[in-house]
Image (spheres, rainbow, N blue to C red):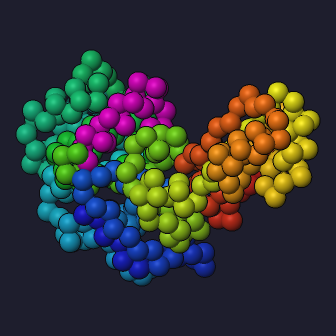
Amino acid sequence: MIEVHGLSKVYGEKPVVSELSFRVEPGRVTGFLGPNGAGKSTTMRMILGLDRPTAGRALVAGRPYAEIAAPLREVGALLDADAVHGGRTARGHLRCLARSNGLPDHRVAHVLAQAGLTEAAGRRIKGFSLGMRQRLGVAAALLGDPGVLLLDEPVNGLDPEGIRWIRTLLRSLAAEGRTVLVSSHLMSEMALTADHLVVIGRGRLLADLGTTEFIDAHGRTAVRVRAVDPVKLGALLGGSDLRAEPVGDGAWEVTGTEPERIGELAAANGVALYELSVRQDSLEDAFMRMTADAVEYKAVPA
C-alpha cells in the first residue's frame, strides 16, 4: 500500500501540503481529488521522491521510494505525459526504461499493445498528440507489471474511447489486488472509476471516504415536484412547513422530506401531479459543495 504520514511541504513561506496523512489500500481504485493548487501533484511527487518533504514521510510497500532497487517492477507512475524525449520513438523510449530496470524486451511490445500504440511504435514522440503521449505514459507505468500505480490526470487529452479504456484498465488492475491512486478533475469519471476518495484542499485532508459514503455525507437529496396547476402547487408548498424553492418550468425542489409526504399533501388538497421524483447530488455536486471554501480561484457567474 501507499502510506502518507504527516506529510508537509513549504515553498519559501508558502505551505503547499500541511500535515497530510492517509493510506491507499490495495484492491481498489482510490481517487485523489482537490481544487487547483490543493497540493495533489506535490503530494504525488513526494511519494515518488521527486520532491523532498519539509516534514513527514511517504512509504510505498513499507519503504521510501528511493530505497526500491528496481522501481519500475514495484511502482508505475505517470505524472507528466510531456516528460519524454521527443526525438525518440515510442518503442525506443520504452526500451530505454526497460533496460534501466532489467526488464525483458517482450514487455515493451506487450504494453504498447495494451495502450493501443502498436502501429505508432516506430513514430517519433514529438509528432504524438496529447492523447497519444498519455497512452505512452500509461504504457511506461505498466512496463514493469507493478503492484502500485500512481497516475496524475491520466485522461487528460484522451478521446471517449481512451477515457473508457483508462476506466476499464484501472478497475481491472485494482481487481487483481494492485494499489491504484489516480487524480482527476473529471468528477463524472471519478464517480464511475473510484471506489474510495481522498480529498484535499489547501494542502490539508478534507475527506477519506468511500465514494458512495462521500456523496451521502456531502451531497444533498431533493424532491422535484411538478403539478397540472403550478400556481396551486406553489401556494400549497408556500403554505406548508416544507423547504421548497421554484426551479423553473413550474417545478419546485423540496429538501428535508420524503416524496411520500409531498404526494400525500398534494392528494389531500386536490393537486394533481405531473412529476414527483428524487434527485441525488452527483459526485461533482458533493465535491463542489464540500470544497467551496478551499478553491484558490473562483470565477464570478455571468
Front residue (pair 200, 262): 262
Left or right, 269 with respect to 277, comes to right
Quadrant containing the N terminus is bottom left
> Magenta segment: does it hold 156?
yes
Total marks in image: 0
Q: Is residue 161 above or below residue 299?
A: above
Note whether residue 37 is visible: no
Left or right, 3 with respect to 70, comes to right
Front residue (pair 186, 136): 186
**Which residue corresponds to the image point at 78% horizontal and 42% vertical from the top-left?**
268
Left or right, 111 with respect to 212, comes to left
Q: Is residue 5 above or below residue 258?
A: below
Q: Is residue 253 above or below residue 124?
A: below
Q: Position of residue 165 (x, y in %)?
A: 35, 30
**Which residue corresponds to the image point at 27% horizontal and 70% vertical from the top-left?**
59
Q: Position of residue 255 (x, y in %)?
A: 71, 53
**Which residue corresponds to the image point at 88% horizontal and 42% vertical from the top-left?**
234
Image quarter for residue 217? bottom right
Q: Position of residue 105 (x, y in %)?
A: 10, 35
The magenta stretch is 155-174
Q: Is residue 60 above or below residue 276?
A: below
Q: Position of residue 91 (x, y in %)?
A: 23, 30
Secondary structure character of the magenta stretch overall: helix
